Amino acid sequence: MIAPIAGKFRKQIIKDISIALALGGAGGAAWWNLYHIPQAQRRDAYYAKLEASKQ
């Protein structure tokens, strides 16, 4: 007798969504910490230097 395929689609969807959220969160955190924060610090330093040179 062949076992019924019960809940296989739902388990696959839950796994796919979990992996997508984990990878998306990790990618977003990496972008934020490795690109955005240093870029904002460079920009702020530039404007602080520009403001200091005006005075």
Image: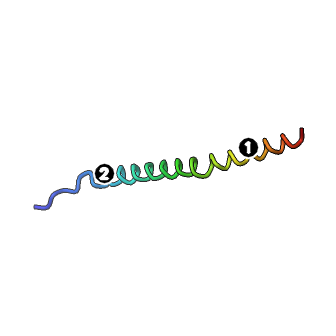
Between the residue at mark 1 and the residue at mark 2, the CA separation in whole angstroms equals 47 Å
Which dot marks residue 44? 1
Secondary structure, mark 2, is: helix
Q: Residues within 10 Å of mark 2 (few under 14, many from 20)?
A: few
Task: Where is residue 34? Give x, y as percent.
Answer: 57, 51
- Mark 2: which amino acid? Lys
Secondary structure, mark 1, is: helix
Task: Where is residue 27? Give x, y as percent.
Answer: 51, 52
Q: Residue at x 53, y 51 (%)?
A: 30
When the figure is inspected, residue 28 is found, relative to residue 52, above or below; the finding is below
Which of 37 and 16 lies nearest the eye of the viewer?
37
Q: Is residue 2 left or right of residue 41?
A: left
Which of 40 and 16 lies nearest the eye of the viewer?
40
The colouring scheme, among rainbow, by chain, secondary structure or one colour, is rainbow
Which dot marks residue 11? 2
Q: Residue at x 31, y 55 (%)?
A: 9
Q: Is residue 34 left or right of residue 4?
A: right
Q: Residues within 10 Å of mark 1 (few under 14, many from 20)?
A: few
- Mark 1: which amino acid? Asp
The quarter in which the N terminus is drawn is bottom left
